[in-house]
Image (cartoon, coloured by chain):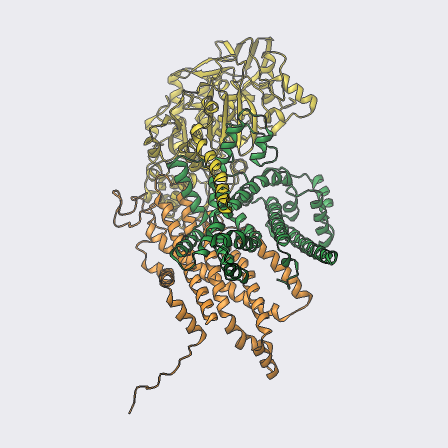
Chain colours: A yellow, B green, C orange
Amino acid sequence: MSRLAVKQHLYKAILLPFLCIISACNTENDKSLSNHSIVYCSEGSPESFNPQTVTSGTTIDATSNQLYNRLISFRGEQNTIAPSLAKSWHVTRDGKMITFYLRKDVAFHQTRYFTPTRFFNADDVLFSFNRILSEEHPFHQVSGGKYPFFQSVSFSNLVESIEKINDYTIRFKFKYADSSILANIASDFAVILSKEYADALVLKNIKREIDTLPIGTGPFKLKEYRPGAYIRYAPHQDYWDKPSSLEQLIFDITPSSIGRLTKLLAGECDVIAFPIAHEKIKSKPELELEEVTSFNVGYLGFNTLKPPFNNVKVRQAVALAVNKQAIIDTVYQSKADMAHSLLPKTSWAYNKSTLAQTFDISKAKELMVDAGFPNGFTMNLWALPVQRAYNPDAITMAKLIQADLKKIGIKVLIENSLDMGSFLEQLSKGEHQSVLLGWSADHFDPDNFFTPLLSCSSAESGNNRTFWCNEDFDDLLQQALETTNVTQRKRFYSRALAIISTEVPLIPIAHSKRFQARKNIVKGEFLSPFGGIDFSKASKN
Amino acid sequence: MESILARQVKTNMLTFTLRRLNLFIFTMFLLTLLSFGLSFLFPGEQLMNISGQVNATPEQLIILGEQYQTQSNIFQQYFAYVNMLFHGDLGISMASQLSISTEIMSFLPATIELTLVALFIAMLFGIPIGFIAAINHRKVTDNIILSISMIGYSIPVFWLGLLAILVFSIQLGWLPSAGQISLLFEIEHVTGIQFIDILLSNSPYKWQAFQDASAHIFLPACVIALAPATIFVRLARTAMMEVLESQYIRTAKAKGLSFGQIIYNHAIRNAMVHVIRDVGLQFANLVTIAMVTEVIFSWPGIGRWLIESIYQRDHTAIQGGLLALSAFIFIVHIVTDFIYAALNPLARESRHGT
Amino acid sequence: MARDKIYLEEEFPSPLLQLWHNFKETPVVMLGFGCFVFLTILALFSPLITPYASVENHLDFLLLPPAWHNDGNVSFLLGTDNLGRDMLSRLMHGTSLTFGLSFVVVLISLVIGVVIGSFSALTSGIKSSFLNHFLDVILSIPSLLLAIVIVAILGTGLNNTLWAIIMVLIPQFVHITRNAVTEEFRKDYVLASRLDGASSLRILYHSVFPNILEKLISQATLAQSSAILDIAALGFLGLGAQIPMAEWGAMLKNGIDLFYIAPWTVYLPGLAILFAVVATNLVGEGMRHALKVSKEA
């Protein structure tokens, strides 16, 4: 054979199998694997694997419903409280004592780092809650000693004691009645950990791992976590409830929203968080866009401890100068409701008569002069660096507000260079003058909008980004919690809303809808109007 | 007679090696100097920048001060730094608080994998096309090839990457758009080079994983390879044109060898030698392009890691990454120099300065 | 009485004119040159001729496609982006930024590089050898990487990007100048001038520079196309010009998030960069070709 022919054959010999490899891949495409796996493109890395210590939605999505269970949970259309690890409970008439009767034969996860030798019992409940309540608890200081949700609802002030009656009965005693307590115990944060695991960690002196290598009773267990890259979950074979039909659940961490959309369009992700380009998704027959009215609010909060926002007139002036409609059109692309008060209109405590002031530039200018700033001032506005359901693009929102406030003489400097962790940290130290943030409620009780956001105790824990502390307001909240009479509670909440309206510690901007996009071969209702996603309900065709 | 010649050749190779070693040491010296200097130039405290321990307690700070000799003069500080380097300690990342040398070792193989595949593709397509252009000099084919390669050389790589994803991942759905391999496969991270890791793993889906990894590497490698390929076209064309004009080719023609024989037996081999010399130089360019491409394709390589460290203002990581990346490029440069010198004894003689 | 010249005199054009003559010969190169001139004029006069201010938000006209589209609007010829900014104005303004500034950057680094290179050529010994090796090392670090690190030190923003790129380009010019000057100094005409008593500086200025000018110009065009790509790359990575500046790379970065709903925000800036780089490369190629031809003649 001549050399030329040899060379030609050589080229073919290399090229053909190469092309074969490439072209064959997407058609075969690991059908067997992908049929029983779901890849979810999430928007960020979880801060920890224990929802007790955080409030961030990203962490809740990754952990709460996947790895853990709570004593009680929300179920059904009306989102009523339903049994979970507690199969029944009894509340005394004065509301000061609740007894939970626990489920038997509930198994904890078995992983490469832990093998349980017993089922779930009251010791685990005791451990999980005492860790939060008691400062002397050996695990209290682990991972920072902060339990922001519990602090913001004054959990430690509320609970007098928790008693173990027997292995499957546990009793909570409260110092006063609080009608939202059941909702708080059912929230995504009140997960049940394994005491046996905690004890094993103490022996090896690696207590930190209770939050980084989690053990729970939930439908999935942690298989592998590569920070910033992915989380791999495997199904919990001995799950007490209906087990998942999936063989693998993978969170593909993709902070860029265009990256998530690309992966969905290219078929690399089955479900994506916070999708953009809704028209594009709707135009594709193999994709589905879901929406759910969220119980949330995006707001512009003022640091009421720092000038100039310690002056209520200044706050009112800014409230009048912000063009909310433009923000809804641009940032939310009209997929949100304009917020007139802190509560969305789907809450039973919503009150039309206490609406916030509307858009009025001349009145704003007058107020500025009144407040002693006829020539305006310079301020900083911190914009949240990640997407959230309540605020998909804080930077653009900040720029629009910057342009709005320029008209009343205020120069706005936008601060957005931090990552989410540092951002939240600095906020809790009060480093900001104003901030674009928001709140997603954890349950339907209206108290969840007020106490964690604007109460005095929340100002202490740093979760109240306005550091606003108003005694009358706090009193009203307290009174509303002491009664279970809905009409009375409504009245208290309207008065509370009126105070927010006049004092303006924050400007509510919008209540958004939460969207999710998925391939239509993914089935199940796993998106909820509040709280984290629950993949145990998801399956693939 | 033969032994004298052999000795001469050996000596030449030896002197060549020594000279290259000298250059290498000097370069590493300068690079470490640069990296050390960066810790002073970056904003923030120098000790923080060089060690990355932002959460250190006062006691730990004292120990750190000892390690980096902050109390002594600048020369001792530099030597302390180099000493740490020799022990493999590049400090820890300010953002993730993990050891930088570990992070680099976990990301560098992915970049090596990607750049080598890209280099291979660039040479595979660039060199033959360059030869074809040279053979058809002054004809239409030559002009077409030159025009296309000029455009290929001018396209901004980040734009090309985006368009490639749009066309091949989304509109055609042929190739994936991000990552090294689909997450459905559980391949344990042993070396970081996906193909080797697949072979080493105990997954039942090895062949599919292999296909999947090939599909993932193909698009970014092609995007990276475009600009270098056009440069290879030009280099190969020039080399081949020079060779075709040279004496021994004319001799071969005079001897009556056919065109095909001339090309395959003589011209290609000699032209290739010239091209190899420039591969090392091209590699630096290729790595830069790879960095930007890694960001677009979310390829878990050192380029993307370095750029993210810059966003996060992680000074320790930037220092370490720059040092590692530059050293890597330089080592490849020297290796290609060696290959070239092995193939072409003429290159072993010294060149005056540069 | 004035008479027409009867005898055709041989004209010997100066080297620069000869260069221009050769340059003009290739039509493609002239096309590139035309585009280059067009871009330069645009860069100089863009603030005056853009239809709208490049950072003005037109909130009623968000995400408008280019005018030839069904939903397009003739008053926004190339469409608008997500904050209602006119693409055409931004692209024109971007010419001053990406293209215009690349020119300025190359000019500055050329001057500085030539000065340093000349001094280094005049000295010799250990200092010179050290400088050689130092330059080698700097030249082996990829230019974008070096620019990125310098930006990491100085901070982000267009100004710092420019300083970074200047610093990165200087070694190239130093290298060329040093080699060229050293080579020229070995030639006889320099020896002749020296024997006449001319100082080094004088020789440099009057004799050597005109001869190495061509090499410098050739390197300058290469440097400019690389500078355009580097400025755009840094803008794209978010390390250079920040939004809302209309730099092409930053525009591309802004456009990515809108890629699927407004693809023109990605196509247009990319095409602009491609256009500018091709024009610069054509001019550079033409120049190098003309140099080669005039040397062979």
Residue ID at (43%, 41%): A395
Left or right: where does residue C169 sit relative to residue A377? right
The tally of labels here is 0
Position above or below: B94 against C232: above
Residue B12 in sight in this render? yes
Picture coordinates of residue B140, whole percent (x, y): 38, 56
Q: Residue furthest bottom?
A: C1
Residue C292 relative to residue B3: left or right: left
Q: Position of residue B21 (x, y in %)?
A: 69, 53
Q: Which of C62 and A338 is in front in this view?
A: C62
- In the rendered image of this protein, does residue A113 appear above or below residue A394? above
Which percent across, then down, holds residue B306?
A: 56, 44
Q: Does residue B72 appear left or right of residue A163 in this picture?
A: right
Of residues C22 and B194, the one nearer the viewer is C22
Quarter of the rendering occupied by the N terminus of chain B: bottom right
- Which residue lies at the image location 38% right of the left edge and 48% below the top edge? A406
| Quadrant location, the C terminus of chain B | bottom right
Q: Is residue A290 above or below residue A86?
A: below
Answer yes or no: is residue A372 visible: no
Q: Is residue C172 above or below residue A18?
A: below
Q: Residue at x 36, y 35 (%)?
A: A277
* Furthest residue toward front: B256
Is B253 positioned to the left or the right of A396 in the image?
Answer: right
Residue B121 x %, y % = 50, 45
